[in-house]
Amino acid sequence: MDQLLYASEVFINGLMTGVMYSLVALGFVLIYKASGVFNYAQGVMALFAALTLVGIMNGQVPFAHLINAMFGTHLDKFGWTVPAVLAIVLTAGVMVLLAILIEKLVLKHLVGQEPIILFMATIGLAYFLEGLGDVMWGADIKTLDVGLPQGISDTVEQLTDSWFGYGFFIDRLDIWATIIAALLVTALVAFAQYTKQGRAMRAVADDHQAALSVGISLQFIWIMVWSIAGFVALVAGIMWGTKSGVQFSLSLIALKALPVLMLGGFTSIPGAIVGGLIIGVGEKMFEFWIGPMVGGATENWFAYVLALIFLVFRPQGLFGERIIERV
Amino acid sequence: MFYREAGDFKTSYRDDGQTFPIALDRWGYYAIVAVAALVVPFVINDYWASAILLPFLIYAIASIGLNILVGYAGQVSLGTGGFMAVGAYSVYKLMTAFPEISIIAHILLAGGMTALVGMAFGLPSLRIKGFYLAVATLAAQFFLVWLFNKVPWFYNNSASGQINAPERTVLGWAVTGPAATPAAKYLVCLAFVVFAAWIARNLTRGMFGRKWMAIRDMDIAAEIIGVNPLTAKLSAFGVSSFFVGIAGALLFAVYLGAAEVTEAFGINKSFLVLFMVIIGGLGSIFGSFAGAAFLVVLPVFLKNLLVGTFGWPTDLAAHFELMIVGALIIFFLIVEPHGLARLWRLVKEKLRLWPFPH
């Protein structure tokens, strides 16, 4: 009985982790649907957004390290701190700017190339952004606190204690992440279904050329989609950054979104959510049952191997569109 | 003597099909091999060997291997780091288990071992393709690194979790361990590079290469005209992993001497080799060399320029390097998706017309 309760605690924690994966995966799906680009840089975008947010909040001078090295000055901070809400708005602005730059400098020149070329271009973009983030804000590990509650939730612990005689340890941050993710998904679905831009976005996703011929500006849609993806990256960056500090490993956690997508299907928003939950629960349960037998740390690869095995049987993922190939 | 075929009469099919049909190219190639084998070992010093020449030669083997898979067969792999680790750990186990057998045999066996592992992880390529496959090969990367980290048998239960190359000799010269001279290390790597390039060149222009390219260009059509996708894809994974495994074995045994798997064979290695292939040129043996040379020299050059000349701190220079490599990848994909090899081909086209272009 104890074992079962403990397992269900692991299960719930897995669900919460899964929500975080889904958050990153959402950004991938958005961009993939609208522009056919598989954006490897999504994870680094989350890192970059989190770095920028921390930098703005602490009033750091951007490129301080570089300027100091070039001119021998000793710049570090402006000496003010910016409230979290304002900093988030400013960071969102930076992400929009980034989206415009990516469209103008990279995507515009790669229209009509094979998907794999675009994919490799986003790997290049990931490297560039990683370097840029470090040059702009420094590479040291930063703590991020935008006022989200953290720590173990007492309410849940007491409640479950009174029900089962066993208190569940659940991080309050995870609960908040779930709520925020749910809100974000609802907002995105509403945006895609009920607004003019959302309809245009879906039209582009269906057929680039047909969308162009009815007068939809591809450039605008792409900038918009990359901005939204940047915003999703910002939210994911805030969540992960608050949880485990803003550091390079953030972009590796985001790599986990890839198997999530393969499970859920690249083209489906519900797929990203369900895939994230399956991966989150799966890797926690696997670590719990099998992990001790094989030396632990199975979380590093479980998601990938699961996706690999899954793909052999259903290449389009759970909710993906059927892949039809013609010669 | 002008750079063209005219006047160089071929009298047999063998002559006609040779790799360097132009006499000047042929002599240039012999000259480069001669200089590399007979002159460089006498002038080489520790800095040149460890900073540029050894990494260049070793990564050239790895990128030839990956180029066969990505450039010729069109199957994108992000698991190169993991496969290099298989090569490194196989050679370590063989070196410590059978010390009396030549290290050359061990390195070749390690390549064979990696080929088997590569083919196993290549099996999903029969069902999935494109970036689905790329992500699937990430499974190989993470799983293999984890395996070598967690199972003590692979590193002979050493307390640090590291593997250290014991001293082994070839013809009486130490090539691994602390006593090895730069020249000996260099010559071993050079021998493997020449071997790899020779095999790869002849495979890619023969039946196997044509099957791979048919699969790359359109796999369904290739299947219809009688290319068996099972053998074509798995042989591409096998041959590619064989070279990658040799590169991993050399990287560990000859170059690094000691290695820790997450650090030496992490996901960054996979990307590094992939970038070499992209920048050098997909589907070109020369491109593999060019890409490897470019990405080995670039950090050294940047470090000398930024740290040495401008006096910047090293961490800043390292971050700049990331930015420059990333930007270069995008630049190459936009401007010249066929990489440095294509530029080289253009130069040759121009040379063949020079000095009378009309």
Image (cartoon, grey):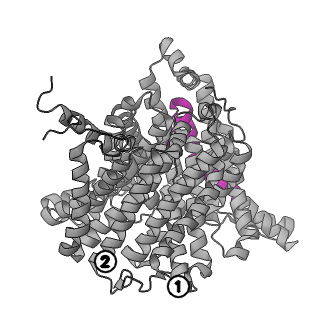
- Residue in view at x 46 percent, y 55 percent: B65
Q: Is residue A106 in sight in this rendering?
A: yes
Q: Indicate the position of residue B45 as horizontal and vertical percent values.
A: 21, 75
Q: Residue B212, which numbered label?
A: none
Quarter location, residue B35: bottom left
Residue A191's place in the image compared with B278, above or below, is above
Q: Position of residue A242 (x, y in %)?
A: 52, 59
Q: Earlier in the sequence, mark 1 or mark 2?
A: 1
Camera-nearest residue between B25 and A145? B25
* Quarter location, residue B164: bottom left
Dot 2 corresponds to which residue?
B184
Screen quadrant of the C terminus of chain B: top left
Residue A36 percent across, percent down from the top left = 52, 32
Q: Is residue A28 one of those drawn in magenta?
A: yes
Q: Residue furthest top?
A: A214
**Which residue has dot 1 on it?**
B96
Q: Position of residue A32 (x, y in %)?
A: 54, 35
Q: Dot 1 lies on which element?
A: helix
Looking at the image, residue B280 sits to the left or right of residue A151; the answer is: left
Q: Which residues are magenta?
A: A14-43
Q: What's under tag 2, amino acid-wise? A: Ala
- Cα distance between the residues tagged 1 and 2: 21 Å
